[in-house]
Image (cartoon, rainbow, N blue to C red):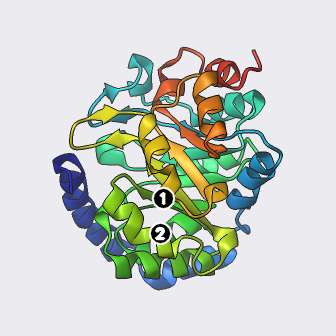
Amino acid sequence: MPETLAAIIAHKREEVARAKAGVSMGELEARVAQAEPPRNFFGALRRMSDAGLTAVIAEIKRRSPSAGWIRPEYEDDGFSPEIIARAYLNAGASAISCLTDERFFAGRLEYIQRIKSVVPLPVLRKDFVIDPWQLWEARAAGADAVLLIAECLTESQIVDLLILSQQLQMTALLEVHSIENLLRVRPHVGFPHPGYGLLGINNRDLSAMTTDLNHTLRLVDLVDDTSVLVSESGIRTKDDLTRLRRAGVKIVLVGEHLMRAEHPGRALEAMLGRS
């Protein structure tokens, strides 16, 4: 595990332990029972990609461990994910990814419901999931999908979390970076139900802190079903989307590039060729 990821996971274990001590499983289950049904994250992306177009998961992200605050104004406590979510919707996003990790990314779990209150798009909780309790927490907070990072989970944990995600009717985006982890998780993509599973290839190498779009293109031939493949990070231009589509990749997750722009929605329009 890269050093940066190891530090995040060590803190996340402490964070989850505190959260579990403060909110019982029974309380979470009651919240989930009262929550609105999740929106179909998987379906929203496949409708666009099946039409031959690129489906974009547009990310709302304030800071990162490597880059710090993405823009100076995002440091303000008045940061509004609603404004960015509306801009993404109008620009053609198919879904939204929302960072909820507070310590390293300045995210908040409450952002999910705030986003869903202003746009009809499904929302992915992007965090570092290490415990089933977090999936219940995500669903109770309104998440329609969750990120599972293979680099910080054992194979048995991945299988258990995939099953629970499906039981909670949330799409699971199972993310890998290394070839070894891709081969390890490949048999589990789409388990236990193909309508709830996506495979993500993260183009960011946390060991070297570099990003390379070609990473997806190098690994794509090892993916059994590219219709569920999501290329993540390092995607900046319309030409990047064209290169990925030619390789059979029609779903992307784009974050930092859009959030660095003064107007994230306009940046997405330009990427999609709509400006």
In the structure shown, which secondary structural element does the residue marked by tag 2 occupy? helix
What is the spatial separation of the Cα atoms under label 2 and label 1, in whole angstroms?
Answer: 9 Å
Q: Is residue 125 left or right of residue 58?
A: left
Q: Is residue 109 visible?
A: no
Label 2 CA crowd tier, 10 Å (few <14, some 14–19, many 20+): some
Task: Tell me the quadrant of the picture where the N terminus can be found.
Answer: bottom left
Q: Which residue is mark 1?
A: 222
Residue 154 appears at what percent x and percent y? Answer: 31, 75
Q: Is residue 223 left or right of residue 116?
A: left
Q: Which residue is mark 2?
A: 186
Q: Residue at x 27, y 60 (%)?
A: 12
In the rendered structure, are the residues bearing label 2 and label 1 in contact, judged by CB atoms less than 8 Å apart? yes
Residue 21 appears at what percent x and percent y? Answer: 31, 75
Residue 195 appears at what percent x and percent y? Answer: 70, 70
In the structure shown, which secondary structural element does the residue marked by tag 1 occupy? helix
Q: Residue at x 77, y 29 (%)?
A: 90
How many tags in the picture? 2
Viewer-proximal residue among 208 and 139:
208
Viewer-proximal residue among 53 and 60:
53
Q: Residue at x 44, y 25 (%)?
A: 74
Which three-letter amino acid code belongs to the residue tagged 2?
A: Arg
Q: Is residue 90 visible?
A: yes
Outermost residue on the front side: it is 221
Viewer-proximal residue among 84 and 203:
203
Which three-letter amino acid code belongs to the residue tagged 1?
A: Leu
Q: Earlier in the sequence, mark 2 or mark 1?
A: 2
Outermost residue on the bottom side: it is 26
Residue 27's label in the rendered image is: none
Q: Is residue 241 above or below residue 275?
A: below
Quarter residue 144 falls in: bottom right
Q: Is residue 35 above or below residue 81?
A: below
